[in-house]
Image (tube, rainbow, N blue to C red):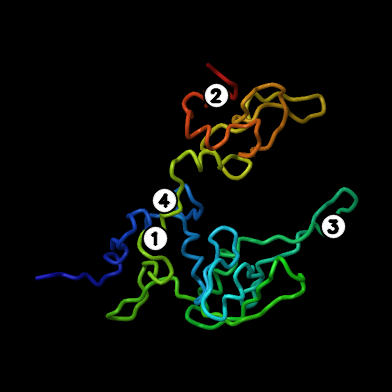
Amino acid sequence: MNIEPKNVTAQLHHRAAGNPPSTLPDAAISNCFPGLEFDFRNVWRRVFEGIQIHEAHGFVVRAEGELQRLEGHYPIQVADTPTLLEVRGPSGTQEDASLGSTFIEWSNAIADVLRTSAGQLVPCQFLDPDADPQAVETVELRIRPLFARSEVTDEQLPLIDEGTAQPGELTQSLCSPWQNDYRECGCYYWAASRPDYVNVESTEQGSSVGNNWMARQREPKQYEPDNPTNPRQISYEDLFRDWQGLLRFIVGGRDHD
């Protein structure tokens, strides 16, 4: 005899095929970027039926049928929610100046649209970055449901729908080897799991000088933002080959043998 629990607690602890326990909603720490327990961006890339969006940069990488004309285009508005906004702030000559446009994190921006319009057609505006910036195309796309539904009761389940993220996809873009994310994530971006700005000394002007922990040489001291492509800083390949010989201990904020 088989016992199939129907209660919500049992559903929450269901082991989804192909994905580890850390991808379950009750086990996640709600950080969607790679390097942690799963990469939630892999859910958002198939949020629209008929197209697939790059999980990080937000442009259409693949489309079906007549929607293939949208490949390479960026979604700039979904329903009434814009994903491309003007940035304003102080400039060298003005207190309130236009600093250009930027794409906001579209996956978070359209969270409310997902909640209210799953399974429905919504108007979406797309921009071709190589064409006239005023040439915006509007198409209606159907929003995929984020969560699966029970085949028995048709109730929403606390599991990601396989049409949105197939088994194994939630973790396929996590950094391997670990040096990728270890190199990428510094305090210039978010809270770092490694030293960042070290050997810091104040200057007479009130600013500071020091060393980026990833710098190959410690002189001259200066403020230098983290950049994996900067030849003066340790690269990904350097870490792959000799992380134990290149990384330094820091005691009290300063280099230590």
Cα distance between the residues tagged 4 and 1: 11 Å
**Residue under the point 74% across and 25% down:** 202
Q: Nearer the viewer, mark 2 or mark 1?
A: 2
Cα distance between the residues tagged 1 and 3: 42 Å
Question: Around disc 4, counting alpha carbons within 10 Å, would you say few (fewer than 14), some (14 to 19), or many (20 or more)?
Answer: many
Between discs 1 and 3, the one toward the N terminus = 1
Q: Mark 3 points at which residue?
A: 97
Place of residue 244 in the rendered image (x, y in percent of width and height, measured from the top left): 46, 26
Is disc 1 in contact with disc 3, using a CB cutoff of under 8 Å? no
Secondary structure beneath label 3: strand
Q: Name the residue under label 1.
A: 25
Cα distance between the residues tagged 3 and 4: 40 Å
**Residue under the point 69% across and 21% down:** 219
Between discs 2 and 1, the one toward the N terminus = 1
Is disc 2 in contact with disc 1, using a CB cutoff of under 8 Å? no
As drawn, the label of residue 250 is: 2
Query: What's under tag 4, amino acid-wise?
Result: Glu
Question: Around disc 1, counting alpha carbons within 10 Å, would you say few (fewer than 14), some (14 to 19), or many (20 or more)?
Answer: some
Secondary structure beneath label 4: loop
